[in-house]
């Protein structure tokens, strides 16, 4: 089996998990919920296996490098980190509802990665990327992005939740209480903020090694800083000004928009980081 | 009125102004919003380009606001300065209170805040309060830096506290920002960022600075012994750019090193990076004239810039310039000589002679097909040369930032209280915790603690 075959299969398993989470939610059944967790775990394991297989394949081609070097490979890794963090949150906090918002993301990412416009060929590394910092930089950034993605999902859930005491039997009534959502958003943002910081810092150290400056206001660098500033604002507003609930949820969504732009939008702007 | 006569006046107001977290939020969001501009409008390009793109009015406005180099503009720097002052004032302001929490003059535990806490678990046990206390106390003592017990009317209060010092984490994060700002400032004041192109076999000590046209002279020479670049066999993508460099000081080679992208040379605080490369033709070359009518071939030596006589004394050819890449009718030609043809009778014209296509000039349908061969190409290496004495400070800031964020987010100051009460017929246990306001995670801590304590109480009956 090749890595691309594995990636096609797990795309479907992620899709299946997404549907199972929705079914468990709508019909309030625990069996589909358990199956959904199982499917996500299987898909994540396959995802990891695929990443390692692609790594091996690159060595067989004589251009061996960690599969973290272009848009396609970053999407695959992104899907994996989201699935893992999602599973961890479910396990640690026993919140099945996380799957409702975190479940669809890996599926959508894998589906996007399989579009023909995303080049999935294994390419050799250009000189600028030939560094051990590649792995540390890309991995930490994407762990951060994944945590922010889940925080954004939880925040959206918060925003669509009807205010006040909704009827407990309705679908929206099954959304956990505001405190739980607010707390989880905060936890995910803190986790993401630490990893985004490490990601920016490893990137800066790497840039100083390859390009002779640790910071150059390249669009990707600047956008990662914008993202960092938004989440820094969120943390200060919450801890020091006592913001909670809706305002924090909106900031968390705004922060994730910046993440998305840092990731994709920057490719539209000129700069050293665009995947071309 | 002088400042000193009115200590509660302006100074105090300023201090209050900068001590506000509201100000931090405003500055952080302003920095985020304004930073977008420089990612949309390319920075530091030729003013002519901007003028053409934006027109007179917009160009003047943008230019006045230094939008074309916004990250170094006065107003962006002012924002950074305000943020720095804000951070310093806020930190000093709060550090006093934090210090009192970390090093209290007299520490005591009271049960009331715990009884009111949102983070509680209650359960009942068959064991007596004394049994439970004997069971829990040594276990908790190991886990909490400060631990104490208090008897109550019908039971025990067990207090634990740890992680006071983690309240310093946030100050580490703030200090890290100061370090980075200071490092950045030191770099821009005492460092430089320049570039130099050195042909193979040559050396120089003159570095052209990036901002401005000025030059800087190093007290050593950089010699480029060799430059090589390799491509991947299958894809033709660039694989490696390698310059063999030597540092020559007072006529002596003091250091030799091959540099590639990601592996620079560092010498006496100066960093030399592989940045670009280019091709230069040898100054001497052989020009071949093939007469169209007869097919006769004439070869002549030529030097760039000096006219060469055409065969039959019909005019001159001057090789004026060389380009390693030259766009021509939608394709890019490599190794092109730009020449000027001055026929004896007629107008001078400019012609292209690509070294790799000897028959290219036949297209011109002139009296001669001209080609240039026998040239050795020489590579030059493009080096970026920098000095940045701020880097150690910035890196110290990086380290402090990571440690500070970790401590602030994943460790926290927590106080717990276990209240064991004889309720007649059974024992009620209350586990409760308090932490800094709005700090998530305490509830989970109490949940885990309650589970562990219940498990330990089961052992009593097994034992």
Image: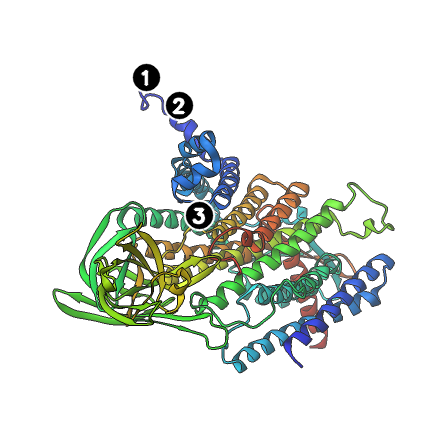
**How far apart in space, not on screen, are marks 1 and 3 (Cα)?**
36 Å
Farthest left residue in view: B250
Q: Chain of mark 1?
A: B
Residue under label 2, please give it.
Answer: B9
Check contact, mark 1 vs mark 2: CB within 8 A. Answer: yes
Q: Secondary structure at mark 3?
A: helix
Residue under label 3, please give it.
Answer: B174
Q: Chain of mark 2?
A: B
N-term mark: 2 or 3:
2
Residue under label 1, please give it.
Answer: B1
State whether discs 1 and 3 lie on one chain: yes
| Residue A149 in which image quadrant | bottom right
Viewer-closest of A153 and B162:
A153
Q: Chain of mark 3?
A: B
Viewer-closest of A201 and B85:
A201
Callout 1 crowding tier (Cα within 10 Å): few <14, some 14–19, many ≥20? few
| Relative side of A18 to B354, left or right | right
Viewer-closest of A131 and B239:
B239
| Relative side of B370 to A143, left or right | left
Callout 2 crowding tier (Cα within 10 Å): few <14, some 14–19, many ≥20? few
């Amino acid at each position: 089996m090749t890595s691309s075959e594995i990636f096609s299969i797990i795309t479907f398993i992620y899709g299946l998990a997404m549907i199972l989470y929705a079914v468990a939610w709508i019909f309030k059944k625990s069996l589909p919920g358990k199956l959904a967790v199982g499917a996500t775990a299987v898909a994540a394991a396959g995802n990891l296996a695929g990443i390692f297989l692609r790594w091996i394949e690159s060595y067989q081609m004589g251009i061996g490098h960690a599969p973290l070097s272009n848009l396609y490979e970053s999407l695959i890794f992104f899907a994996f980190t989201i699935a893992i963090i999602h599973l961890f949150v479910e396990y640690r906090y026993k919140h099945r509802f996380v799957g409702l918002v975190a479940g669809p993301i890996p599926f959508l990412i894998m589906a996007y990665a399989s579009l023909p416009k995303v080049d999935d060929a294994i390419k050799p590394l250009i000189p600028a990327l030939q560094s051990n910092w590649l792995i540390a930089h890309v991995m930490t950034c994407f762990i951060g992005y994944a945590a922010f993605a889940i925080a954004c999902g939880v925040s959206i859930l918060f925003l669509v939740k009807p205010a006040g005491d909704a009827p407990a039997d309705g679908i929206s009534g099954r959304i956990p209480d505001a405190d739980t959502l607010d707390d989880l958003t905060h936890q995910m943002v803190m986790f993401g903020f630490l990893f985004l910081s490490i990601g920016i810092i490893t990137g800066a150290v790497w840039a100083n090694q390859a390009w002779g400056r640790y910071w150059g206001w390249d669009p990707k660098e600047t956008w990662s800083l914008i993202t960092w500033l938004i989440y820094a604002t969120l943390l200060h507003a919450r801890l020091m000004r006592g913001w909670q609930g809706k305002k924090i949820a909106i900031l968390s969504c705004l922060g994730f928009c910046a993440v998305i732009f840092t990731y994709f939008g920057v490719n539209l702007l000129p700069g050293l980081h665009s995947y071309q | 009125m002088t400042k000193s006569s009115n200590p509660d006046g302006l100074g105090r107001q300023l201090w209050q102004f900068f001590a506000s977290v509201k100000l931090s939020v405003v500055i952080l969001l302003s920095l985020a919003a304004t930073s977008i501009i420089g990612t949309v409008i390319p920075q530091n390009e030729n003013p002519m380009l901007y003028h053409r793109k934006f027109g007179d009015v917009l160009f003047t406005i943008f230019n006045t606001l230094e939008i074309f180099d916004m990250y170094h503009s006065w107003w962006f720097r002012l924002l950074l300065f305000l943020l720095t002052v804000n951070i310093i004032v806020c930190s000093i302001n709060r550090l006093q209170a934090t210090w009192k929490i970390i090093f209290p003059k007299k520490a005591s535990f009271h049960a009331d805040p715990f009884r009111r806490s949102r983070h509680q678990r209650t359960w009942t046990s068959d064991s007596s309060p004394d049994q439970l206390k004997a069971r829990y106390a040594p276990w908790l003592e190991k886990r909490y830096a400060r631990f104490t017990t208090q008897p109550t009317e019908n039971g025990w209060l067990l207090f634990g506290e740890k992680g006071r010092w983690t309240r310093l984490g946030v100050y580490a994060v703030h200090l890290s920002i100061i370090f980075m700002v200071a490092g950045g400032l030191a770099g821009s004041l005492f460092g430089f960022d320049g570039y130099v192109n050195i042909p193979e076999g040559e050396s120089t000590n003159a570095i052209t600075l990036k901002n401005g046209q000025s030059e800087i002279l190093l007290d050593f020479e950089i010699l480029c012994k060799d430059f090589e670049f390799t491509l991947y066999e299958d894809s033709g993508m660039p694989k490696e750019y390698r310059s063999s460099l030597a540092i020559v000081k007072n006529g002596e080679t003091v250091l030799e090193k091959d540099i590639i992208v990601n592996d620079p040379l560092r010498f006496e605080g100066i960093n030399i990076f592989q940045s670009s490369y280019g091709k230069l033709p040898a100054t001497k070359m052989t020009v071949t004239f093939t007469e169209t009518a007869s097919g006769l071939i004439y070869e002549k030596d030529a030097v760039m810039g000096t006219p060469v006589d055409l065969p039959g004394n019909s005019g001159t050819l001057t090789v004026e310039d060389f380009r390693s890449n030259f766009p021509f009718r939608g394709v890019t030609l490599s190794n092109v000589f730009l020449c000027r043809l001055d026929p004896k009778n007629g107008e001078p014209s400019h012609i292209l002679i690509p070294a790799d296509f000897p028959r290219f000039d036949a297209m011109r349908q002139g009296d001669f097909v001209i080609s240039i061969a026998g040239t050795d190409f020489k590579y030059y290496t493009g080096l970026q040369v920098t000095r940045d004495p701020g880097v150690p400070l910035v890196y110290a800031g990086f380290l402090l930032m990571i440690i500070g964020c970790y401590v602030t987010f994943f460790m926290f100051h927590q106080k717990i209280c276990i209240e064991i009460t004889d309720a007649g017929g059974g024992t009620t246990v209350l586990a409760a915790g308090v932490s800094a306001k709005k700090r998530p995670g305490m509830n989970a801590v109490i949940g885990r603690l309650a589970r562990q304590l219940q498990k330990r109480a089961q052992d009593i009956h097994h034992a």
